[in-house]
């Protein structure tokens, strides 16, 4: 017992660094723990033969190698799938860029078509407007001509009626009938 208490007391007093000596403290060197571990290994190791242990280690090694092989195969498949996915992504990105470019060019084309169509429509409307103005001017001119002609005719008839007597009137009618008769003979 004195040894045990001495060992605890010796723990409180540490030697200075740089000293060299043989350690006789049984708890500090831990021979008890080492002897227990070695005893357990000997006791339980008696029933295990070297070939059985070798077989266990070989089986374990084979399982580890199989796991590594499977992992490598999975890694290879994953890399293939990743490369395929990257290729598809690049293809889709190219198609998206192409659609984007085509979309922009289509928008520009439609914009130009709309501008041209609007210009043509405006030009047609301008032509219709000019035609309508010309038509209305011609109609107004014709109406003025008709009124002038009617007024001139009424003035001439009024003048004729006031200047003509019955005898002059009959002679004018006879002359006109004669002219129409001569025209009829020429045309026949």
Image (spheres, rainbow, N blue to C red):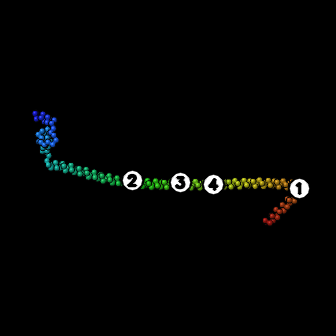
Of residue 16 and residue 177, the one placed in the foreground of this image is 16
As helix, strand or loop, the secondary structure at mark 3 comes to helix
Q: Please report the residue visible at 86 percent of the width from the left and 54 percent of the height from the top.
A: 162
Asked whether the viewer can see residue 158, the reply is yes
**Dot placed on the residue nearer the N-terminal end, 3 or 2:** 2
- Is there CB contact under 8 Å for labels 3 and 1? no
Q: Earlier in the sequence, mark 4 or mark 2?
A: 2
Up-down: is 12 above or below 148? Answer: above
The residue labelled by disc 4 is 126
To which quarter of the image does residue 84 belong?
A: bottom left
Tell which of 146 and 52 is nearer to you: 146
**Dot 1: what SS?**
loop
Disc with the residue nearer the chain's start (3 vs 4): 3
The residue that label 2 is drawn on is: 89
What's the CA distance linking mark 4 and mark 1? 58 Å
Residue 111, disc? 3
Report the quarter where the C terminus lies. Answer: bottom right
Q: CA distance from mark 3 to mark 1?
A: 80 Å
Q: Earlier in the sequence, mark 1 or mark 2?
A: 2
> Residue 155: image x %, image y %?
82, 54
Asked if marks 4 and 1 touch (Cβ < 8 Å), the reply is no
**Is 177 in front, or is 137?**
137
Asked if the residue at tag 2 contacts the one at tag 1, i.e. Cβ–Cβ closer than 8 Å, the answer is no
Separation (CA) of disc 4 from disc 2: 54 Å
Which of the two labelled residues, at mark 3 and mark 1, occupies the earlier sequence position?
A: 3
For the residues labelled 1 and 2, the Cα–Cα distance comes to: 111 Å
Q: Which residue is mark 1?
A: 165
Pick the quarter of the image with the N terminus.
Answer: top left
Q: Quadrant of residue 179?
A: bottom right
């Amino acid at each position: 017992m004195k040894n045990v208490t001495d060992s605890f007391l010796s723990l409180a007093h540490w030697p200075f660094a740089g000293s060299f000596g043989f350690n006789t403290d049984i708890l500090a060197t831990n021979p008890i723990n080492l002897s227990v571990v070695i005893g357990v290994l000997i006791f339980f190791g008696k029933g295990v033969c070297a070939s059985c242990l070798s077989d266990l280690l070989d089986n374990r090694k084979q399982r580890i190698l199989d796991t590594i092989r499977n992992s490598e195969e999975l890694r290879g498949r994953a890399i293939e799938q990743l490369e395929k996915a990257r290729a598809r992504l690049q293809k889709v990105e190219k198609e998206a860029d192409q659609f984007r470019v085509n979309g922009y060019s289509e928008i520009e084309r439609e914009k130009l078509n709309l501008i041209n169509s609007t210009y043509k429509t405006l030009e047609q409307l301008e032509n219709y407007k000019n035609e309508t103005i010309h038509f209305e001017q011609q109609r107004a001119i014709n109406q003025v001509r008709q009124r002038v002609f009617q007024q001139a005719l009424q003035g001439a008839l009024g003048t004729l009626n006031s200047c003509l007597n019955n005898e002059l009137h009959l002679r004018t009618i006879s002359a006109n009938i004669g002219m129409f008769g001569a025209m009829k003979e020429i045309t026949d």
